[in-house]
Amino acid sequence: MPVEEQVMSKTAKLDLGDKTIDLPIIVGSENEHAIDISKLRTETGYITLDNGFGNTGACKSAVTYIDGEKGILRYRGYPIETLAKNSTFLEVSWLLIFGELPRAGQVDELAEEIRKHSLLHQDMRHHFEGFPATAHPMAVLSAMINASSCYHPELLEVKKIEESSLSMVAMLMAKVSTIAAFSYKKSIGEPQRYPDPSLDYCNNFLHCMFSKPYGRYTASPEVVRALDLFLMLHADHEQNCSTSTARVVGSSEANLFASMSAAVCALWGPLHGGANQRCIEMLEKIHRDGMDVKQVVERVKNREFKLMGFGHRVYKSSDPRATILKEACDDLLKALGVNDPLLPIAQELEEVARNDDYFLSRNLYPNVDFYSGIILRTIGIPVEMFTVMFSIGRMPGWIAHWKEQHENPNGRIARPRQVYTGATERDYVALESRP
Ligand code: ACO
């Protein structure tokens, strides 16, 4: 159960020379300590400066807990390893959004709502026609999520998500999957395949992606399980770049569609979700060019490029998602009898990096993106779609955070300060007098 944060009797003293103030210390349910600076500027005129927000808590949240030093990740208190073994993506989506594991029947209710919403409004097909076939699917996804709101104006005013508004949650989860598959079909010049209400979430997505006009695709249980696990492991990761974006956009009371669309854009970058695409491209290049792994590592150390799929702002010992996915990757390849030449390259890179002081001293380990790409490749997902797959998985997490933020009675619009370093006041120079 969520535990309210406590305010310690102990305070932090800030000595500013002419003034000393006491700042309250807040302790979270996992004994994380934070100095509450909400009154700092009012009381002292000072602000804090924290490049990349590495030391800044932007909110209080009860959704996901990470201990980066110990490699712990828990959704609503449940260890990710336990969920990976026992649960499913839809069950975890419910857990993240509504705070508890679903009771009997609730997951079926969510699945049913998703089925109901999986078709896109017929007019939206024209939007797909307007994009060039070469459009990056993340651009299409973000635009189409936002465009979906035009067809559901009644949802634009929704300020609270409750179990009674399950339909809105289901709509986003359903649309994101259909849009993703439709944009893939468009990119390869094939007719779109409509979702099939007799299929579950993962099977339906795979059907829309891979069924041909002349033949239906049926996924093997191993592929379905690997996809479900991939989505579950990507479902939330507390205040990362895209989730923070969803919360920042939502803090202006922008609607859920606009906030999710913005989160997709934030995820696209190669330092965030876009790393899964860059990682597999890097492995493909090493393979294609017959590069020596040890030399690749030397070039990384010479700062010619970064080792994609390595390093994390929060994890400093291991990313538990990477550990689970590495095993899942091995299992999937074995079950399907696939011999992917990229897997031994990835394993060798990891081995070399794990024994090299450059990586050890900087706490650089494989992150979630390092092995996930090999799983997606094996499923048949093209590399340009990798970050889209991440978006499908992350959707319930973004929704959970948007919901949490909107439920906070003390919520305020996100509006950081800055330390201005530009020119001080100057006299205006008329055009004809400018040098
Ligand atoms: N390869 C080589 N060196 C690295 C890498 C890497 N992947 N990541 C960090 N470093 C080095 C930096 O150059 C820096 O070295 P220095 O102190 O000598 O200058 C040091 O490690 C610290 O790195 P920062 O960039 O300060 O770490 P930060 O926390 O800001 O960045 C990030 C984290 C963006 C994930 C970074 O590790 C990175 O770019 N990794 C590759 C991209 C990637 O895989 N992103 C996915 C992250 S997981 C996710 O978003 C789903």
Image (cartoon, rainbow, N blue to C red):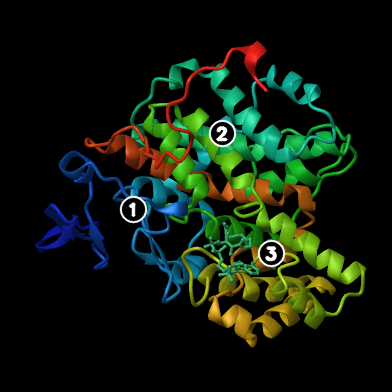
Percent coordinates x, y for residue 302 in the rendering: 73, 73
Q: As displayed, is residue 129 above or below residue 160?
A: above
Counting residues from the start of the chain, the first of labels 3 and 2 encountered is 2
- Which quarter of the rendered picture does the C terminus lie within? top right
Q: Nearer the viewer, residue 30 or 168?
A: 30
Counting residues from the start of the chain, the first of labels 1 and 3 encountered is 1
Q: Residue at x 15, y 55 (%)?
A: 24
Percent coordinates x, y for residue 57 in the rendering: 33, 53
Counting residues from the start of the chain, the first of labels 2 and 1 encountered is 1
Residue 252 visible to an observer of this rendering: yes
Q: CA distance from mark 1 to mark 3?
A: 27 Å
Q: CA distance from mark 3 to mark 2?
A: 25 Å
Residue designated by label 2: 261
Residue designated by label 3: 308
The image quadrant where one finds ligand 1 is: bottom right
Crowd tier of the residue under label 1, counting other residues whose Cα lies within 10 Å: few below 14, some 14–19, many 20 or above: few
Residue 298, picture quadrant: bottom right
**Kind of residue sitting beneath label 2:** Ser
Q: Element at badge 1?
A: loop
Residue 228, picture quadrant: bottom right
Residue designated by label 1: 57
Percent coordinates x, y for residue 11 in the rendering: 12, 61
**Label 3 C-beta lies within 8 Å of the nearest ligand 1 atom:** yes
* In the displayed structure image, the side of residue 125 where residue 267 appears, left or right: left
Q: As displayed, is residue 86 above or below residue 191?
A: below
**Kind of residue sitting beneath label 1:** Gly
**Kind of residue sitting beneath label 3:** Met
